[in-house]
Amino acid sequence: MKNQEVALLLNKISALLELKGENRFKVIAYAEAARRIENLPTPIENLYREGKLSEIPGVGQSIAEKIKEYLETGKSSYLEELGKEIPEELIELEQVPGVGPKVALLLYKELGVRTLDDLEKALSAHKVRNLPRLGPKSEENILRGLETIKRRSSRIPLGLALPVAEELVLYLKQFPFVERVDACGSLRRMKETIGDLDVLVASNDEEKAMQAFTRWPEVQEVLAFGSTKSSVLTKSALQIDLRVVRPESYGAALQYFTGSQAHNIKLREIAIRKGFKLNEYGVFRIEDDKKIAGATEEEVYAALDLPWIPPELREDQGEIEKAKLGELPHLVELKDIKGDLHVHTDWSDGTSTIEGMVRGAKKRGYEYLAICDHAQSLGVAGGLTWEKFQEQKLKIEEVSQKENFPILWGLEANILADGDLDFPEEILREFQIVVAGVHSAFRQTRGKMTERIVHALKSGVIHILSHPTGRLIGKRDPYEVEVEKILEVARESNTAMEINSSPERLDLKDRDCRKAKEEYGLKMVINTDAHSEENLDLMKYGVAVARRGWLEPGDVLNTYPWKQLLEWLKGKRERMP
DNA sequence: GCCGTTTTCGGCCCGACTGTTTTCAGTCG
């Protein structure tokens, strides 16, 4: 799948065109095409083979030609031509906060600066302050930007950002002049990683709100301080932007600050066509500047003849078109979840007892639970022998009786390097539920890995494929595998795909969930893979992925009532061809 | 460069903050 590569190419072209001072709409066109391709669920090579490149929104004849050349030859003559005029390295300079295309070009033309190293030298020699329209303050600002870029980790996982956001929201809520607080941006959309944290406050005393924010004990440095907008860097090097508006504009501001940018642009275009203007203060009629909506998000969308759109969908991935038609999905919610179908206990590498996990499940309002400890081959995880599993079965039955709570006796089998499972099929059929996944030999070729998983699924004994792509966000890439092929065989074998809720996995990912549902009609299961009772709380992250994948309760097996779930589990093996 | 139930030409989202300026360009989200 070369989608990321092609997107990178188009983004480079966009950046060089901007440096060159080309028409800004042309610049935007390339960037927009890149964004579209980045979010495409299908490999762009397939679209190319079918001659359907121009069917991608934002890709016209000219950009299609450039993609074609790149896919055929692995290079782009257009990019190379541009590179002769403007060195590609300058794109890196723009990564420094405070340095945009104009300044980058100025630095290059006047001082010969091409790299971050060059920039550092020019700054310490105080050459930057003498450039036209720049002064000592700009020099200092760029220097700070350079330090920030070294310090600031790139995007941080949702699982780390969410607790920070919750803490800040709690802190701000204690002030009487703060009427409402919400974390917005990609965090509210529950993206798997977060760049900056965006927080919105409703207040009639902006000044006090800003001071309260910048005096939050976690703040290390104030980057910008305005009357309605400020930015800080926390001690953990996370950038937080705070925006304050009056309560009567809160809905419009919430909408604006939640994004995504692409979603907002679409909405503003719709507003214009209706004779309105949409900004963070409200919806205004252009002819007399009269405000017609703004206090709530619902009324902002309603003013544009749209139903309220859940934040997780606001990515300009077709949600606005569906909203117009009244065909938005009724997304699955945490309260729909009736049980966790993949948890570990202290029988293998978990830390809680069976009783502990059951108590945790009951506390969360679940109706059932599946205990799926590791099997023998996974020595590092204290995997169980068949004898041990039989012993565990008795214990599970005992606890189930005592607690009057349905527990499935299952396991998480290991898909070995050759695609066999670590127990023979006859034994696996004894278990009430079989979850299976890849836990070793990650570095196989694409073909081998695909064949390995296909072979395992075709055994027909697997109910759920756990963490289907094996990625660890920011630590390990997904293994090389042909996802489409896996989904296809999953359909044939009635296998459900797991959405693993662990914030470092979130696997399957949102985009693939949507594809699994829409193109393959698969069922998904949202599991925590909890290794402790507390870990059961991770379910919310998996639900977020499902929502971003447009899933409804009916698409998610563990929203089923107990009886219906049992039928599905039994039926799965009977339906095998 | 892309796009079109008001268009194949003429549009293309909107505003805050900063610094260096005397009215605004550049950057950012």
Image: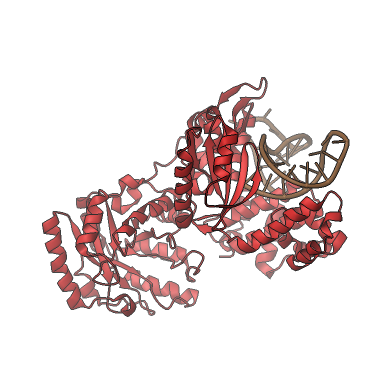
Residue ranking furthest to the top: A288
Q: Is residue A124 left or right of residue A459?
A: right
> Which of the 4 image quadrants contains residue A531?
bottom left
Side (left or right) of A125 relative to A352: right
Quadrant location of residue A486? bottom left
The quadrant in which the C terminus of chain A is found is: bottom left
- Quarter of the view holding residue A37: bottom right
Comparing A207 with A29, the one in front is A207
**Residue A40 drawn at (x, y percent):** 55, 55
Of A427 and A90, nearer the camera is A90
Q: Is residue A260 visible?
A: no
Vertical side of A74 occupied by A416: above or below: below
Residue at point 45%, 77% (across, down):
A448
Q: Is residue A224 above or below residue A155?
A: above
- Frontmost residue, A409 versus A112: A112
Residue A205 lies, in percent from the top left, at 57, 31
Identify which residue is drawn at 75% across, 55% down: A140
Looking at the rendered structure, the number of numbered marks drawn on it comes to 0
Q: Residue at x 69, y 49 (%)?
A: A29
Which chain is red in the picture? A
Give the colouring mode of the picture: by chain
Q: Position of residue A522 (x, y in %)?
A: 37, 56
| Residue A409: % across, % down | 20, 65
User: In the rendered image, what is the letter of the chain coloured brown?
Assistant: B
Q: Is residue A489 left or right of residue A149?
A: left
Image quarter where the N terminus of chain A lies is bottom right
Whether residue A228 is visible to the viewer of this picture, yes or no, is yes
